[in-house]
Image: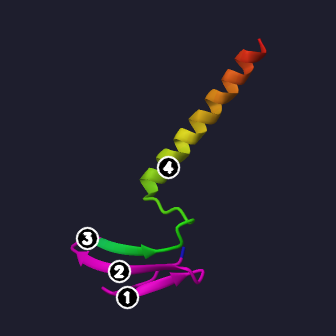
Amino acid sequence: MLALSRKKNEALVIDNNIEITILEIKGDQVKIGISAPKEIPIYRKEVYLQIQEANKASMENKGLDALKKLF
């Protein structure tokens, strides 16, 4: 993991087309802005993990349904 220090209104660039800017700092919270192409999905980690779990459960259920159709 790369750890960087940034101040308000400072930014960093990832892969020439994603820019992350520090918008506000209040106590222990940091507000960031992300500029990226529309085709790049951006999720909060907790949402991303929920999506992954839902996809996994869906695939497991589809596998069971396919087996039931065989019999």
Q: Amino acid at mark 4?
A: Leu
Provide the residue span drawn in magenta: 2-29
Residues at circles 1 and 2 in contact by the CB criterion of under 8 Å: yes
| Residue 36 or residue 49, whichever sits in front | 36
Q: Which mark is residue 49?
A: 4
User: In the rendered structure, which amino acid carries the disc numbered 2?
Assistant: Ile
| Kind of element beneath mark 3 | loop
Which residue is drawn at the image coordinates 52% and 67% (left, top)?
Answer: 38
Spatial distance from mark 3 to mark 2, Cα to Cα? 13 Å
Q: Which residue is mark 2?
A: 22
Where in the figure is residue 54, as x and y percent of width and height?
53, 39
Q: Identify the residue shown where x is 31% and y is 79%.
A: 23
Magenta stretch holds residue 6:
yes
Mark in front: 4 vs 3: 4
- Give the numbered dot on residue 10: 1
| First reached walking from the N terminus: tag 4 or tag 2 | 2
Q: Quadrant of residue 62?
A: top right
Residue 70 image point, x, y percent:
78, 16
Residue 53, percent from left and from top: 53, 41
Work out whether mark 4 precedes mark 3 in sequence or the reverse, and give the earlier one.
3
Q: Is residue 56 magenta?
A: no
- Upstream in the sequence, badge 3 or badge 1? 1
Q: Tag 4: Cα neighbours inside 10 Å, few (<14), some, or many (≥20)?
A: few
Label 3: how many Cα within 10 Å (few below 14, some 14–19, many 20+): few
Q: Which residue is mark 3?
A: 28
Q: Which callout, 1 or 2, points at the residue further toward the start of the chain?
A: 1
